[in-house]
Image (tube, rainbow, N blue to C red):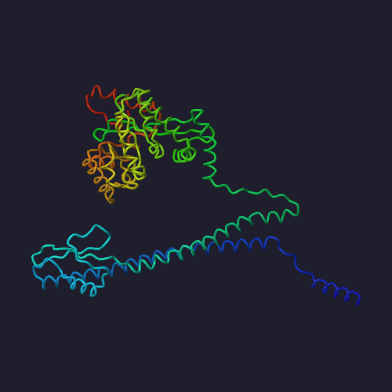
Amino acid sequence: MGTVVDGISRIETAAKGIKPARNPRLGVLRARSAARLIALAALLGTVATLFCAGLGFGLARASDDRAATRQRAALRENIAAFRSLAGEANEIAPRFVRMIEQSVQLKGLKFETDPAADARETQPVINGQGRIIGFFTWEQERPMTQMMKRLVPLIGGLVAALLGFAAFSVWQLRRVRHEPIAREAGAGAIIPARPVVNPIMDDEQFIRRELPLALAAGELSLHYQPIVSAQGARIVGVEALLRWTHPDRGAIGPALFIPVAEKMGLIDKVGAFVLRRALEQAKRWPDLYMGVNLSPLQVRDSAIVDLVRDTLAQTGIEPSRLMLEITEGVLIDNPDEMLRRIADLHDIGVRIALDDFGSGYSNLGYLQRFPIDKLKIDRSFVTALGPNSNGGVIVQAITALGRALGVSVLAEGVETEEQRVLLRLAGCSEMQGYLFAKPGPAFTIDRLLALGNARLAPAQAALTLPQALTA
């Protein structure tokens, strides 16, 4: 009996000295939890920092605006006092100006009869007869806003540090992703890594590899979208739109491969292909004009003038039937050179349209300098048309501007009958969009024209495009 008890005692003593086996997944789980917590805290800290910064800037601007309002009100009171004292005097003594400057606390207050067009604030001075005899001008001070601007580097550094913590935590999460599997598989096991793929970089690499082959193999094609008259929806022109159908990936949008073509230096070849193919197809529709989009890089290259001239001569198309569409950004970059370039294209006889008007840097001065024939209202303003939006006001302003400049106005992205009616009432001369027809191969334009002509002859009346589509 004693021997058994002694054996049991020795077993219990040995068991107390044995340490529990460590769970191999516990450390990884803890690392993941810590990494997630740090990433979440860093992102919340970033959002809080940006929110506080925005709130601080808003409060600083509001404080400066209130101070400026008080100063301007005090200045008007002093001007009223001067009017009661000076009567019909046409000048203000410098001593009185200094008194007002000290009283109102306006920096650099001056009395000028003809103020310069600079950033200084102005306040007209009216004498007893109600005539403006000059202006008070002063330097605008915004101390609170300036103080917040001095804090921008500190805020930027804090945001960068927080984002760095978040990025490090995400990297930690990726690093320990496969660790539990490796531990359970045992020593010597081979665990395949899962590479992190950037879809954008993957698409760009694919396009870089396949686009030159597509050009050589003739995989690029053009679709055409009708442009209709606002009165009767009669087809007056078409816009050529580039398409790429890859044998394996299918349709690839121009928004993906055009920027890559510009980086690769292929935009000249692509642009020449589009221009030639569009003008060759224009022979099928002698009563329609052809719209062709130009890349900003094409417009900046002086060779575009010779390309357009030679292609027109080779295809035998009248220059007036070609509408070259450019974006507003082209006009900003070296405007003097762009003015000469567009003038040279205009001298050939082609017409120039300003595409996506209103969506970018709309400098009205450029419209007076550049020989523009058409304004294309951006589809975002057309989408905003409705009884509860201000899109109609903007469209009316653009059409009024077009009439004042003597250019036609085209609205793109028309998708509903309500939009068509509102645009016609606003004064748009042409329209384009899914309401009339989607872009399609050249034979779809042939079919639309054939349907329209077949029904136009006996009726002796204009046939609308929706009628032709439903025929």
- Residue 125's x, y, as percent? 16, 65
Quarter placement of the C terminus = top left
Is residue 56 rendered to the left or right of residue 252? left
- Residue 53's x, y, as percent? 41, 65
Quarter placement of the N terminus = bottom right
245 in relation to 176, above or below: above
- Name the image quarter holding residue 440: top left
Q: Residue at x 70, y 54 (%)?
A: 182
| Nearer-the-camera pick, 254 or 424 | 254
- Say whether residue 102 is visible: yes
Q: Among all residues in the image, which is located at the extreme front?
A: 94
453 in relation to 19, above or below: above
Q: Residue at x 24, y 57 (%)?
A: 117
Q: Residue at x 75, y 54 (%)?
A: 187
- Residue 378's x, y, as percent? 33, 43
86 in relation to 188, above or below: below
Is residue 223 rendered to the left or right of residue 133? right
